[in-house]
Image (cartoon, helix red, strand yellow):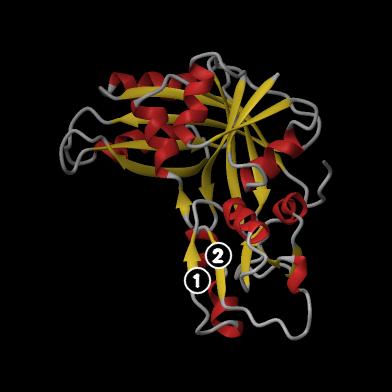
Amino acid sequence: MKIAYLGPVASFTDWTTTRAFPNEERIPYVTIPDCIEAVVEGEVDYAVVPLENTLEGSVPITVDYIFHEATIHITAELISPIQQHLMIHPQHNSSDFTLNKILSHSHALAQCHKYLHGHYRGIPCEQTTSTAAAAKYVSEHPEEAIAAIGNELAAEHYGLTIIKKDIHDILSNQTRFIVVHKNEHALALTTVKEESNKTTLMITLPDDHSGALHQVLSTFAWRKLNLSKIESRPLKTELGRYFFIIDVAQKMDDILLPGAISEMEALGCTVKIIGSYSSYTIGTDLQI
């Protein structure tokens, strides 16, 4: 199979995709829409893109593109630990090295704010397009006294030396990645650990009237269907109009979920089933 992922090589999405699909052909794409369109147009079989982070919340471009632009389905979810490390060119790995600048993606810099403030206060931090891009730049500029923040795969791929591991402020930092496909099905993965099941719905209310959202949530409540997430996103039609993303903590069944969907549709809602799938956790060991 061909698996698209949000690149470049040695990004966190690459690290996750490598663990989930170690024996498949993995192809980096520049943007999340590029990854999704590669699936839609048949260039690849699946795509892996980020959906949500512990610290930064949802990835809007992923949610919005699936709702507004592409007919695509979630076939699996990958929960991956996000471990940020400080790395330098091996040429500078000495006691007299003085760091002048730190490079990384804006999210990585934010995730390491406390460490950077405590240990490198006054050292400028510069944003890059990705953590892998920061590592690549450091590897290509040994003449500069700079460091990158990124993952272990980036250090290995670009030949950098990790001088401080796990500098992220919250050790439980994780990112939800989704595996998408043109057709609706659940993808069974054997290289990662299955933890739970989910069904993701995108719901548009019929009108902006009092109690509309309450009616929707009641269809789940009286059936005792547990919701693991509910979030609103702009419909992009007018100010104050939203659609809702709801994760139900179970796979599609024959009675309860179809009944809830039918009830919401009877209320005038538009319900889009994005996927019913298994959630997998990614181990912290690096096996390429």
Compared with 62, 273 (above or below) is above
Residue 54 image-quadrant placement? bottom right
Relative depth, front residue between 167 and 268: 167
- Towards the viewer: 1 or 258: 1
Q: Is residue 222 visible?
A: no
Residue 80: image location, x then y, percent: 67, 47
Identified at 77% across, 37% down, the residue is 192
Q: Residue at x 65, y 42 (%)?
A: 9
Type of amino acid under label 1: Cys
**Label 1 crowd (10 A; few <14 / some 14-19 / many >=20):** many
The kind of secondary structure element at disc 2 is: strand
In the displayed structure image, the side of residue 212 where residue 125 appears, left or right: right
Residue on which the image places disc 2? 103
Q: Compared with residue 21, is residue 101 higher up or lower down, i.e. above or below?
A: below
> Mark 1 — residue?
125
Q: Quadrant of the N terminus?
A: top right
Kind of residue at disc 2: Leu
Q: Residue, x 49% and y 26% (percent of image)?
A: 36
Kindly identify the residue that appears in the image at 49 percent across and 17 percent down.
40
Q: Position of residue 101 (x, y in %)?
A: 55, 73
Which percent across, then down, holds residue 72? 48, 21
Q: Are marks 1 and 2 in contact (CB under 8 Å)?
A: yes
Few, some or many C-alpha atoms within 10 Å of disc 2 (few <14, some 14-19, many ≥20)? many
> For the residue labelled by badge 1, is the local secondary structure a helix, a strand or a loop?
strand
- Say the numbered circle drawn on residue 252: none
* Left or right of 253 on screen, residue 157: right
Q: Where does residue 108 sit, x and y in percent of width and height?
A: 55, 61
- Residue 230 visible from this viewpoint: yes
Q: Quadrant of the C terminus?
A: top right
